[in-house]
Image: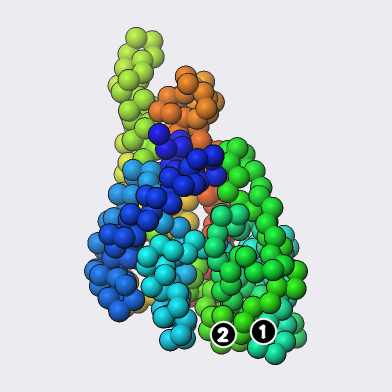
Amino acid sequence: MPGAGGFDSGRDGELERVRVIEEKMYARGWMTMAWPVEYGGQGADPIRQLIFREEVAVAGAPSGGQGATVIAPAIMLHGSEEQKRRFLPAIARGEINWCQGFSEPGAGSDLASLQTRAVRDGDDYVINGQKIWTTGAWKADWIHLLARTDPEAPKHRGISYFLFDMNTPGVSVQRLTHMTGRAELCQTFFENVRVPASQMLGPENRGWYVAATTLDFERSGIDRVASGQRILDDIRAFANEATRDGRPLITIPNVKNRIADLQIALEVGRWLAYRVAWMQTKGMVPNYEASMSKVYGSGLNQQIANHGTYILGLYGQLGEDDSRAPRGGRIAFHYLHSVQATILAGTSEIQRNIIATRGLGLPRG
């Protein structure tokens, strides 16, 4: 069966299984429904793509990684014709597995403070530095990375965006185990890594603005809400099966009301995500709207996790490797995994700042 929190390609034997399933989904065009036909898509409505991704997340199936949903849209918007011809068909076929090189040990929420350097040398850039939280870097084929190309410029203006092969000499990866026991997170080191100048995405020193587009796509998905729905379904199933003081747990008002409130909250989250997809159907690039979806969805997942462990009682401490764990340990896993929900892809504080300044027009403090 899949891991408790969905498929885990970090487990022995799971990586190949995930790849086989994703290859089949890519081959059927399911991951790239909303892409333009000329890039290997079906030209479908983004709402249709969103519905598919929602069902995938609820089922706990592989999501296809960052290629189709994060880096490909950025290439379509900012890439050269040569980059589009080179990368988009390969992504559409599921041939490239990507990781993201943005955060650094000293540049997380304040990402524009990053210090990884890229220095021009003939037809190449030479990259030196370190990234952290590069999820899946140990199994990725390519990385999309931010590096500073002009240390004298204001911090947002001296950054460039690069795409390169993870097998390039000088790249090394160290896996990090987080509290769930899985080791998908990594720190990645770059020592005199030579990257052709043709693999810069967008203009030199304008990478921050390309990255802003990438982050908008990363934050705008339905996945957070749908994965929360999967866990709430598990909580509801447990409450229907379990008893307390001889009564079905689901009949106890405090339990029943909590589940009902969470279901209502999930519906709100769904419509926030659908709003983002609607904007895409109109040719708009979501910005603060994506941040609204992200901050709401990640906070809601923590609420679901907290309520779930309360309803499970002591069973809520049993992980996915314990045969006594209700629902395969998914609820306990979700409780641990949700800790990072309000941090990854931009902290909730950053999202609220974006909403305040770009959405509400409030002045920067």
The spot of residue 186 in percent (x, y) is: 64, 53
Regarding residue 290, the answer to whether it shows in the image is no
Name which quarter of the figure residue 240 lies in: top left
Q: Nearer the viewer, residue 60 or 356?
A: 60
> Which mark, residue 124?
1
| Left-right relation of 74 to 209 | left
Location of residue 161 with respect to 300 vertically, above or below: below
In the picture of the structure, the residue carrying the numbered disc 2 is: 198
Q: What residue type is disc 1 on?
A: Asp
Regarding residue 121, the answer to whether it shows in the image is yes
| Residue at image location 50% in from the left, 40% down from the top | 13
Q: What is the distance, in whole Å, between disc 2 and disc 1 at their CAs?
A: 8 Å
Quadrant that contains the N terminus:
top left
Q: What residue type is disc 2 on?
A: Ser
Location of residue 203 with respect to 342 vertically, above or below: below
> Which mark, residue 306?
none
Mark 1 element type: strand
The spot of residue 210 in percent (x, y) is: 52, 78
Q: Nearer the viewer, residue 74 or 24?
A: 24
| Residue at image location 42% in from the left, 38% down from the top | 2
The spot of residue 176 in percent (x, y) is: 66, 47
Mark 2 element type: helix
